[in-house]
Image (cartoon, rainbow, N blue to C red):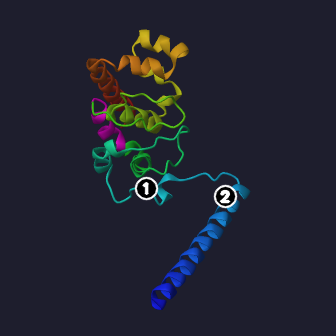
Amino acid sequence: MFRLFISLVVTTIVSCGSAELTKVELDRSAAAATASPTPTVTLSNSPLVQNDLTEKELCKRLRELKKIPYEENKVAGDPIYDGLMSQGRKAIPCLIEKVTDPRVIEDPREGDPHIHGFTVGDAAVFLLMNITGVDEHPEAMLPPEFAKQWTSQGIYSYFAYVEKPHNRLALQNWWRNWAKKNLK
């Protein structure tokens, strides 16, 4: 009985000591993070980037995407997003192939109102826009009536357009044409 008591006391002391050490380390990390300006992050240097996977392997795992940052060119802390962004233009062909993928996933976008029917194809489009710079003028990829709605409805005009599956195919063709003109 006495050994059990000593064992419990030692375990408690060790675990509390570890928790305190972790708390101290976290406090130091937080202080350092707030004391320095926001760094410019190079995606390929991020420890979370899936550098061991090719762009095609990352595209196959696009369904696992959990986070797309609100600001482009930021590290998301999501290995799929960060990995594809670090691949850059090499990822464009496989992302174009994913534009018509209808599988529903949780909307990974930060800051924007979440869409309940967000698909793998939508994730591919958002990544394509970030990689290519099309996000500067996203209405360019939409037909005129939806592009006109962009000024008043923003991203909702995109989601209204892709509600119909044949429009996702048209969007994929738009991206294929974009790639033919811009990737040489």
User: Which one is nearer the viewer's eye here, 46 or 63?
Assistant: 63
In whole angstroms, how far apart are the C-alphas of marks 1 and 2?
21 Å
User: Which one is nearer the viewer's eye here, 129 or 157?
Assistant: 157
Q: Residue at x 40, y 42 (%)?
A: 89
User: Which one is nearer the viewer's eye here, 127 or 182?
Assistant: 127
Q: Quadrant of the C terminus?
A: top left
* Residue 183 belongs to magenta span: no
What amino acid type should be assigned to the residue bearing mark 1? Val
What amino acid type should be assigned to the residue bearing mark 2? Ala
Which residue bears the numbered disc 1? 49
User: What element does badge 2 sit on?
Assistant: helix
Q: Position of residue 30 (x, y in %)?
A: 66, 60
Which residue bears the numbered disc 2? 33
Magenta highlight range? 91-101
**Of callouts 1 and 2, which one flags the residue occurring earlier in the amino acid sequence?**
2
Q: Position of residue 58 (x, y in %)?
A: 32, 49
Q: Quadrant of the N terminus?
A: bottom left
